[in-house]
Image: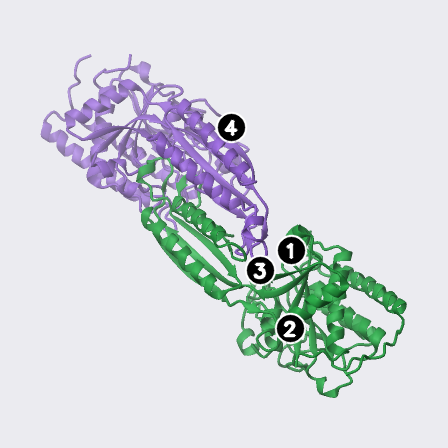
Chain colours: A purple, B green
Amino acid sequence: MSEPSPVKSTEADRKAAFAASCHLLHELLEELSNIGKSEEGGMTRLLYSSSWLKAQQHLQHVMQGKGLVTSFDQSGNLYALLEGTDKNSRHKPLFTGSHIDTVISGGKFDGALGVAAGMVALLYLNEVYGPPVRSLAAVSLCEEEGSRFPFAFWGSRSVTSLSDWDVAGDLKDTEGVSMLEAAEICGFGPISSYPVRPFEPDGYLELHIEQGAVLERTGTSIGIVTDIVGQKRLDVMITGEANHAGTTPMNYRKDALIGTTEMIIRIHELALSYGDPLVATVGTMELLPGAVNVVPGKVIFTLDIRHTDKGIMNRFIQEALLIISESAVRNQLHAEWQEHLSVDPVAMDERWIERIQNACEVLDFSYRKMPSGAGHDAQIFAEVCKAAMIFVPSQKGLSHHPEEFTSEEEINRGFRVLVEMLYQYGYRGKTDE
Amino acid sequence: MSEPSPVKSTEADRKAAFAASCHLLHELLEELSNIGKSEEGGMTRLLYSSSWLKAQQHLQHVMQGKGLVTSFDQSGNLYALLEGTDKNSRHKPLFTGSHIDTVISGGKFDGALGVAAGMVALLYLNEVYGPPVRSLAAVSLCEEEGSRFPFAFWGSRSVTSLSDWDVAGDLKDTEGVSMLEAAEICGFGPISSYPVRPFEPDGYLELHIEQGAVLERTGTSIGIVTDIVGQKRLDVMITGEANHAGTTPMNYRKDALIGTTEMIIRIHELALSYGDPLVATVGTMELLPGAVNVVPGKVIFTLDIRHTDKGIMNRFIQEALLIISESAVRNQLHAEWQEHLSVDPVAMDERWIERIQNACEVLDFSYRKMPSGAGHDAQIFAEVCKAAMIFVPSQKGLSHHPEEFTSEEEINRGFRVLVEMLYQYGYRGKTDE
């Protein structure tokens, strides 16, 4: 396949068009950040809420106004299609995007960046190079966060046929509203006129903020995601004996907290000895009965463990559980646990990784191959197609937070890499096959 | 003073009367346990609630029916007087009693035992020996627990003139009702016709369950309280940095919980090294933001420290705070703390202790001198008069719990000692002077 003739044929024209696209991208991010503003700061756009619907409709309106063909599916995923001249690719475009649902009081960039960048990238490519050979679709996916319904990645699961309304429809939010009821209020769901899925993905490419501080601390512009970590979450319950804090001598006690602190320190030391990318976190802890003058009879805590290698992750967990059992016996306590989440690690596509690396080298952007410690829609797509992710720095590693921040320059570099990748796929015939 | 002639002059008569009194005591405890039954088990009689008032009125009704003169004061303290033949003692009786207010879902014996035993003891003495030389008053005091209003020992503080409505009246319960409003609904308060305090205490003697497991574990019948421990409570706040549990490598973290666990273990070891009667307890702990997938940025915990010696208690606290500061620095955390309760240790009267000990020896009851790790009205009375306490065993050390239990035999022994002490004071002229 030969290099396509650019519509804007001079370097200066393309530069000006890119600068204008960056401007539009920041404008769109700003507009999105004004939808669903939360009183506690940041923004809250829960799936199938009015603010979520408003954001999806705003994106549709902007893309339609700029000449892209948009559509929704039954789940409420929004697509903006840049149709390829190769008609065979019509129903199997490369997807690029992310999500505009947020956690409660979330930030401006988590999700929104990937959606806005994907859409603006298509506008840029269309303006500068005209229609691509192979179709590109920018997508805004539903409920990546799982913050309204207990079903993260619902949008990507449904478009990849990995889930459907039979599985998800009856799930309820905290107020008892089912996912199906909520979807229908927004005009979606199986009885709507929207298709189950209008397209199949030929691949999936996502620009996202890092949500960690590695890029910032190492002064790196671009993170190239090699793997999305696997993750297990355990609930651990340690039972001793609740006693009066005044009348129970120290050596009469079976203090569930004392045993627990020992376990946590030893598990922490074990995690340090494993080294990166293993992370282990105790993020919640409840003491029962939980009174200033009562020796804790029970402690319930969560353990969140992540690694890119399933075998290593499982070995760590076995050792951590051994520590818990041993400490419990030594402290005359009873320990039990329950796994409540288990997600396998997912590798990103090696050839995409290489291509992103090449682009960074050509563009002279510092880069770093790294795992993603957070979950993303890309891990769902990776089950059915090639998937890749591009990270840009997060100031102080903050995400899911009103103060989430990435500078315009940093965003522009990530956007530049995304555009290059979409160009290579859509226009230059550098296919995966 | 000569030995009074008993009304019931034979040993057999007295034994039968004592057995009948024990029966009445258990009956009265059973009746009280049916007032304010809680759905969650146990009983809830919060100060100035309808169940609390019903219990006070029931006691008044029973005592009046059996010929004792009863009265209330403005605070709602109930008195049953056995008037002495020495008229000078009319307004300065020896008090014996406890409280019938409970914690939420409290047990059958904490407080109620001392009240019922005091009242039945007066009935027994009157029946067997007739009127005493020096007056005796059984009392049912208000809000010992501080479980409705944040003002423990309100009843004993008011009758000892150590507090009054000006201090306590505006204190609010969790629903915003003030103590004065609540009292007035029950017919008490400064505008009622009740006196501020009808009597001054010449001394205070209280029978109570141990609320610990020392008597049970050592197979001892009677605890003779030497001191009521002093107590300090601190709120400690450890601040690190909240981070994403997936995207923040272990060595980037400032995990407030990891530092805290180290502090708690070291403080626990320090407490063990001090030995009895020092106790140190972390009973509550809050992790912020407190999500399974977020590294804790803040941990807030309470530290409850008790000892019978103020100097030793303060030295321990200084060392504990040093541990907290050191651990915070080493873990790159910030530590701050605030004392929110400070109660000095209080010694019980030495001559009363000796007299109780003698009684145990004569009665052939095993006894043990011991501190009280819990607070009691006796520590308030000790500020204005001689005070003493008699403990009976608590099964498994349980108190403030629906399963609180002391057997009838154990109660009868404690009651026997109480009766003996009241007899010595009221009838035999063994005064403190």
Question: Which of the chains bears the disc numbered 4?
Answer: A
Give the secondary structure at mark 1: loop
Residue that extends furthest to the bottom in the rendered view of this protein: B88
Question: Considering only order in the chain, which callout, 1 or 3, is on the residue closer to the N terminus?
Answer: 3
Q: Which residue is mark 4?
A: A165
The amino acid on which the numbered mark 4 sits, given as a three-letter code, is Trp
Please state the horizontal and vertical placement of residue A250, each as a whole percent of the image: 54, 51
Apparent side of residue A96 relative to residue B48 in the rendered image (left or right): left
Q: Are marks 4 and 1 on the same chain?
A: no
Are the numbered discs 4 and 3 placed on the same chain, yes or no?
no
Cα–Cα span, label 4 and label 1: 52 Å
Residue drawn at x 65%, y 67% is B389
Decide: is A12 above or below A347. Answer: below
Residue at the spot 27% in from the left edge and 32% down from the top edge: A391
Which mark is nearer the camera, 3 or 2?
2
Dot 2 amino acid type:
Arg
Q: Residues within 10 Å of mark 1 (few under 14, many from 20)?
A: many
In front: A76, or A228?
A228
Q: Chain of mark 2?
A: B
Q: Position of residue B312 (x, y in %)?
A: 47, 62
Q: Position of residue A275 (x, y in %)?
A: 33, 31
Q: Which mark is residue B399?
A: 1
Residue nearest the viewer, comparing A222 with B43: B43
Distance from disc 3 to disc 1, alpha carbons, whole Å, reads 12 Å
Instruction: Check the residue under mark 3 and report the chain it is in.
Output: B
Identify the residue position indicated by label 3 in the image: B373
Q: Marks 2/1: CA distance?
A: 29 Å
